[in-house]
Amino acid sequence: MELNPFDVVKRQIDIVAKEMGLDPNITKYLKRVERALIVSIPIIMDDGSLQIFDGYRVHHLTVRGPGKGGIRYSPEVTLDEVKALATWMTWKCSLLKLPLGGAKGGVCVDPRKLSRGELERLTRRYTSEIINIIGPDIDVPAPDVNTNAQVMAWIMDTYSMNKGRSIPGVVTGKPIEIGGSVGRESATGMGLFYVLEAMYEKLNIILKTQSIVIQGFGNVGGWIARILYEHGCKILAVSDISGGIFYPDGLEIDKLLDWTQKGNYLKDYSDKRYKLITNEELLTIECDILIPAALENQITQDNAHNIKSKIVLEGANGPTSPKADKILFDKGIHVIPDILANAGGVCVSYFEYVQDIRAYFWDIDRINRELKRILLEAFEEVYKVTKERKIALRTAAYIISVSRIAKAIELRGFFP
Ligand code: GLU
């Protein structure tokens, strides 16, 4: 069954509103977005034909500061998906106490089917279409599924050319040469690792001894695979959109990363020992830690009963549906929620934004030290509420994040 991601968001708000006795006016307010811009992006393709793509940029809530959130390029992008992703960014920024709100953008396109020139034209035209609602003090985009530092460079350039001066603080996740931050590329992976380490300390288990399964092998899945592999963990299976590979003795992640970084799919990697599996099969492999690091709605009521890990660490945004959450909770599986687990990305994005605005750059030690400090503080807070109230980590994270937002709304009041 296809779940509408924005319905999932509203369901999650209802769950937390009930748990914390949230003011019904605020509950109502949180279930809509501040603004949603729909644009059409006409591009002359290399063969001379015109193609028109749909694009979106959504601000969910900017009560605590400018909007922040990635831009994804994917044929599955819909307005409701972008609204859901923008809302999750609001919770994530608030949980980390970043002075930022929630936003997200998307273009409905399969970028693998575009030439480099077409991709650049698409990015520049999309940027001009949303130019009035982005900016360092309005809304600051970043990479997400299928976008990268090069795409951010084109956005920064298009915005700057229109304003008549270089404005690096309009996007984060840029190349270092034009105002990007060291440590931004690995940030989501590092963040996942710091949070996982903290969880294992609480559980009193040595992380090194654990077996791992990862869905997704892009920026998030690839980095956490590398970090855990180098840490000494056994990675049993990984997957990309072509499917997954499985080897109970542990995959050689370094070689697989070399392979996929050259543009190859995992399924074409030739090692006779590795078994090809589907993305669905991968989720139900017996392991200690399952890391969904691809798209939303992967663990649902249909397959949650078959999950055989002890921990689910959410690298993706929204990979677990509310019904699946309940099933996993009843089975005693700890789900470390997206808004905490994968928040390292937006955290270092915030550092990049601060560095751009101050025109003063930090070294990698400072980036990772401050990243760890902020994430561990959020983790401790979430863990404490989980223990006190005997609730799931997600509910605890939401209570903390939503309380902070509710307070901000109360203080500012409703205009006029
Ligand atoms: N796309 C990432 C996320 O979902 C990063 C957003 C950002 O850095 O603004 O958290």
Image: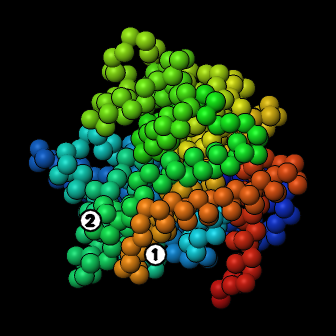
| Label 1, residues with CA under 10 Å away: few <14, some 14-19, many ≥20 | some
Neighbor class of circle 2 (other Cα within 10 Å; few <14, some 14-19, many 20+) is: few
Which residue is painted at 70% across and 78% down in the image? Answer: 408
Residue kind at label 1, given as amino acid type: Val
Which label's residue is closer to the chain start, 1 or 2?
Answer: 2
- CB of residue at label 2: within 8 Å of ligand 1? no
Q: Residue 354's mark?
A: 1
Quadrant occupied by the C terminus: bottom right
Camera-nearest residue between 100 and 33: 100
**Residue 363 percent across, percent down from the top left:** 41, 66
Residue 225 shows in the view = no
Of 285 and 371, which appears nearest the observer?
Answer: 371
Quarter of the image for residue 171 reads bottom left
- Check disc 2 and give the amino acid type: Glu
Which residue position is annotated with label 2? 177
Tally of numbered discs = 2
Residue 165 locus on image (x, y percent): 25, 82
The Cα–Cα distance between marks 1 and 2, rounded to whole angstroms, is: 16 Å
Residue 107: give its label: none
**Nearer the observer, 3 or 178:** 178
Residue lying at 42% horizontally and 58% vertically, measured from the top left: 183
SS of the residue at dot 1? Answer: helix
